[in-house]
Image: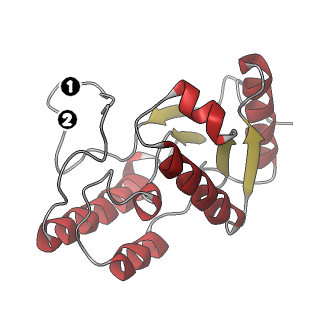
Amino acid sequence: MKKLNSQEDIAEMRHLKPRIVLRRRGEGVTINPDPHGQTPRSALTSIAKIFVWLLEEWFAALFLNKRKTLLICDRYYHDLLIDPIRYRYGGPMWLARLIGKLMPQPGLWVLLDAPAEVLQARKQEVSFNETVRQRQEYMTFVRTQRKHVIMDASQPLDKVIADAECAINRALNQGGNRG
């Protein structure tokens, strides 16, 4: 049985997307305390950005991640479909959904779920009603994915970590190589 922490595993954690075209300029991942506070980009800029994102994901999948057993993304493209305001997306949603279908698909989707009250107590980036809406949208979306697990993130951290490791190991043993 292959284990997540075995010597031959090569794992990487990534925030949101690969940075190939627009490399990071030395800055780390920052938390935006007001993700809905900025105005949307123009439709043309938004469309250009999602096409670049698509190209970066495929380039990374084909050339950069070939030897990886596990790629953990704390956000992924499909987050834009649930919260386009966070990404300042100003283009047509039908195109964003189409691009989402063309993105390389994870071998396992893991949704860390908790009641909206718990999520709001941890992070107040958006209103309570928006938290409720997003939670429902994430649940609906993840349930449509072939391989997914929904975990109760209101449990103690050690339990959540153990459950996540178990789900990832199960997916790796079933042949999922990217999740």
Mark 1 residue type: Glu
Q: Which residue is mark 1?
A: 27
* Of residues 107 and 114, the one drawn nearer to the viewer in this rendering: 114
Where residue 147 appears, as percent x and y from the top left, is 73, 59
Could you tell whether 78 is left or right of 94 in the image?
Answer: right
Which residue is nearer to you in this view: 64 or 45? 45
Quadrant (top left, top right, bottom left, bottom right) of the N terminus: top right
- Callout 1 environment at 10 Å: few (<14), some (14 to 19), or many (20+)? few
Q: What amino acid is labelled 2 in the image? A: Arg
Q: Which residue is mark 2?
A: 24
**Badge 2: few (under 14), some or many (20 or more) residues near its Cα, within 10 Å?**
few
Residue drawn at the location 12% of the way across and 68% of the way down: 42
- Secondary structure, mark 1, is loop
**One can see residue 3 in this view:** no
Tell me if residue 12 comes above or below residue 108 in the rendering.
above
Label pair 1/2, CB-CB below 8 angstroms: yes
